[in-house]
Image (spheres, rainbow, N blue to C red):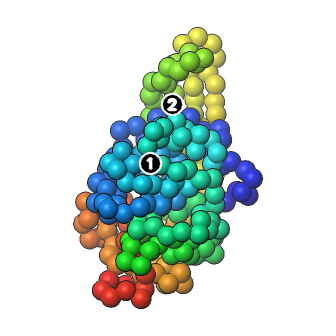
């Protein structure tokens, strides 16, 4: 993971909402758990989850390492009960607790070492009220994650670039390259965004970052080290039990001293 002074998404923040255009599959899960609670979201990005929660009346504190992402979130959250904080989920200490803590859509996978994963879940525990629940959503490990070396460059989509003041519009094509480092449980990911304006040459914006492949065992151990336990596992956003072949691995966490739960 980059040093705190760096912005890992400075070059591609403006494409983030375009990349996730129309994706809201996980919102109902967060709405249900957030009802009647203050929420801390770690890795809030441009406010994709925080803003709908706030629009429903939930008070949200969103934290992200990327100033560029937070700038977009501030525009989106204008007038809503959202507090946005630049911070690192490994070391964050706001000095307060929340009824729910969320780490949506693979945010934990930017923790590139087991120690980073443990530190992030310690942050979750530090900010979670007694009786509260945390939700951590990562990609379920896939057989391809354990293959070493580079994979073919793939085109994910081509979409219209929204017109904004001072920009000519055009189209954007997203291409993705992945190189597996399974001995370290890591994937090196490269995003290329090819921008074709209405006139003039093609422009390419490239960003590289590292993602961790997080297994259920690693997450459960990191949670236990933080004084948390897994209350329930989900294999999708509708609350189905986890099964082989799932795309998502979703843990609902609570403090380990509380009764019940299925660790």
> Where residue 159 sits in the image (x, y, percent)?
44, 28
> Where residue 212 sits in the image (x, y, percent)?
56, 64
In the rendered view, tell whether residue 222 sits above or below residue 178: below
Q: Which mark is residue 109?
A: none
Question: What residue did someone put label 1 on?
Answer: 81
Name the residue located 48 percent from the left edge and 37 percent from the top edge: 78
Q: Quadrant of the N terminus?
A: bottom right
Count the labels in the image: 2
Mark 1 or 2 closer to N-term?
1
Element under disc 2: strand
> Where residue 241 sits in the image (x, y, percent)?
26, 71
Task: Give me the C-alpha separation between circle 1 and circle 2.
Answer: 34 Å
Question: What residue did someone put label 2 on?
Answer: 173
- Characterize the local packing of mark 2: few (<14), some (14-19) or many (20 or more) Cα atoms within 10 angstroms: some
**Left or right relative to 234: residue 43:** right
Name the residue located 45 percent from the left edge and 39 percent from the top edge: 79
Name the residue located 49 percent from the left edge and 25 percent from the top edge: 161
Residue 123 can be seen in this image: yes
Element under disc 1: loop
> Where residue 225 sits in the image (x, y, percent)?
54, 84
Q: Quadrant of residue 104?
A: bottom left
Depth check, front residue: 6 or 47: 47
């Amino acid at each position: 993971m980059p040093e705190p002074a760096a912005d890992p998404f400075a070059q591609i923040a403006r494409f983030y909402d375009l990349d996730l255009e129309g994706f809201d599959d996980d919102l109902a899960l967060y709405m249900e758990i957030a009802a009647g609670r203050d929420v801390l979201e770690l890795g809030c990005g441009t406010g994709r989850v925080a803003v709908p929660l706030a629009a429903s009346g939930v008070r949200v504190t969103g934290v992200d390492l990327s100033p560029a992402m937070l700038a977009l979130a501030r525009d989106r959250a204008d007038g809503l009960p959202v507090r946005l904080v630049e911070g690192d989920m490994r070391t964050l200490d706001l000095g307060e607790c929340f009824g729910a803590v969320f780490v949506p859509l693979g945010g934990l996978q930017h923790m590139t070492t087991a120690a980073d994963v443990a530190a992030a879940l310690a942050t979750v525990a530090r900010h979670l009220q007694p009786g509260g629940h945390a939700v951590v959503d990562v990609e379920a490990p896939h057989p391809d994650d354990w293959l070493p070396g580079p994979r073919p460059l793939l085109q994910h989509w081509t979409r219209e670039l929204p017109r904004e003041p001072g920009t000519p519009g055009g189209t954007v094509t997203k291409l993705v390259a992945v190189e597996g480092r399974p001995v370290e449980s890591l994937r090196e990911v490269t995003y290329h965004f090819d921008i074709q304006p209405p006139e003039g040459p093609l422009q390419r914006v490239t960003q590289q970052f590292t993602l961790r492949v997080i297994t259920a065992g690693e997450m459960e151990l990191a949670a236990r080290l933080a004084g948390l336990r897994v209350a329930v596992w989900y294999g999708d956003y509708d609350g189905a039990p986890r099964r082989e072949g799932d795309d998502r691995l979703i843990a609902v966490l609570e403090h380990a001293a509380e009764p019940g739960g299925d660790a």
